[in-house]
Image: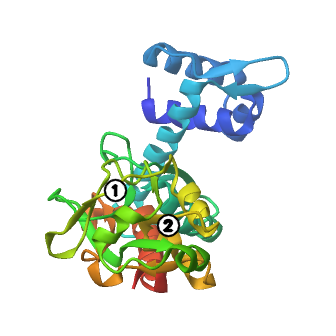
């Protein structure tokens, strides 16, 4: 079986939702298209398409395989153009990962603008608050907050963020402003479990305080909303509280005791050999993130 041609046929069937339409567009007979897809399913050992009298749809396995096929075919096309001396336009599927809240607030808008700029592209976002193995999970670009381990990947720093303790002005007026980390023991604390697995808060010059949170939330958004309501103090990354700080709904305390800022990097595996789809997104992300005052 010509695996490359079989992938092209499968992708076209999935996109058109029709064997007959695929046959016409690819100048093949309908039985030939059917045989190729069936052969591909036999080779893989999984059903890729569900056929009904009205339509053809991908199975769960087929949807995942469709993304991989688009990426592989895009890489092949780009390699051929590069070998012929032409600059390749971005093509295929781009997979991007970032922390959940950072991804929704700052990476998703980049992805949408990227897709508008390159209408033939597809994208897959993976926004989670856990380490992601870029290679094993097929990620093209990662936006990482924090110090990086030595991986051999290309990393471009685009800014930094701070860990900030903040509260609503109404809370500080009622309960007072803490002047040292030790004062936190006399305040109501709200924590986000997604951001802080340990109740120990660290500060500059090795200072540490074991906080006793009255309220634990599973999201940063809930912790920030609770602080905005004037209920207590919370500790989050500066970009997460950025809009509330700009509005004056929250106020930073203990700023003089903060740890050094955490760097933000755009990370990708291939370096100078990165495909056009990666280079184009990295260029966009670096320019936009470096221009964001929340990160500088």
* Residue named by callout 2: 89
The C terminus: image quadrant: bottom left
- At label 1, counting other C-alpha atoms closer than 10 Å, the crowd grade (few under 14, some 14-19, many 20 or more) is many
Q: Position of residue 270 (x, y in %)?
A: 27, 59
Q: Is residue 244 left or right of residue 177?
A: right
The N terminus: image quadrant: top left
Q: Is residue 2 left or right of residue 158?
A: right
Residue at image location 50% in from the left, 46% down from the top: 218
Q: Nearer the viewer, residue 36 or 249?
A: 249
Q: Nearer the viewer, residue 66 or 18?
A: 66
Q: Position of residue 179 (x, y in %)?
A: 34, 81
- At label 2, counting other C-alpha atoms closer than 10 Å, the crowd grade (few under 14, some 14-19, many 20 or more) is some
Q: Position of residue 102 (x, y in %)?
A: 49, 63
Question: Would residue 37 be seen by someone viewing this image from the given angle?
Answer: yes
Mark whose residue sits in front, 1 or 2: 1
SS assignment at label 2: loop
Residue at image location 46% in from the left, 64% down from the top: 234
Q: Nearer the viewer, residue 176 or 231?
A: 176
SS assignment at label 1: loop
Question: Would residue 87 be seen by someone viewing this image from the given angle?
Answer: no
* Residue named by callout 1: 211
Earlier-in-chain disc, 1 versus 2: 2
Q: Position of residue 8 (x, y in %)?
A: 55, 38
Q: CA distance from mark 1 to mark 2?
A: 52 Å
């Amino acid at each position: 079986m010509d695996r490359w041609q079989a992938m092209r046929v499968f992708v076209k069937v999935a996109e058109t939702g029709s064997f007959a339409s695929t046959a016409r567009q690819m100048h093949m007979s309908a039985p030939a298209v059917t045989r190729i897809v069936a052969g591909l399913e036999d080779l893989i050992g999984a059903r890729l398409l569900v056929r009904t009298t009205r339509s053809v749809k991908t199975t769960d396995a087929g949807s995942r395989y469709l993304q991989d096929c688009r990426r592989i075919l895009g890489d092949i096309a780009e390699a051929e153009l590069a070998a012929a001396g032409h600059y390749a336009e971005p093509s295929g599927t781009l997979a991007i990962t970032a922390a959940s809240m950072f991804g929704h607030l700052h990476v998703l808008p980049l992805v949408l603008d990227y897709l508008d700029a390159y209408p033939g592209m597809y994208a897959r976002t993976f926004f989670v608050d856990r380490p992601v193995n870029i290679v094993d999970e097929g990620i093209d670009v990662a936006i990482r907050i924090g110090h990086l381990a030595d991986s051999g990947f290309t990393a471009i720093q685009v800014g930094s963020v701070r860990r900030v303790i903040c509260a609503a002005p109404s809370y500080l007026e009622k309960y007072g402003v803490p002047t040292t980390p030790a004062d936190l023991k006399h305040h109501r604390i709200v924590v986000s479990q997604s951001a802080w697995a340990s109740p120990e808060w660290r500060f500059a010059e090795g200072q540490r305080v074991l906080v006793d949170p009255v309220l634990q939330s599973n999201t940063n958004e809930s912790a920030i909303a609770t602080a905005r309501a004037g209920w207590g103090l919370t500790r989050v990354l500066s970009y997460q509280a950025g809009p509330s700080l700009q509005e004056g709904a929250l106020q930073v305390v203990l700023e003089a005791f903060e740890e050094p800022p955490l760097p933000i990097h755009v990370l990708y595996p291939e370096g100078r050999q990165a495909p056009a789809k990666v280079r184009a997104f990295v260029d966009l992300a670096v320019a936009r993130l470096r221009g964001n005052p929340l990160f500088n």
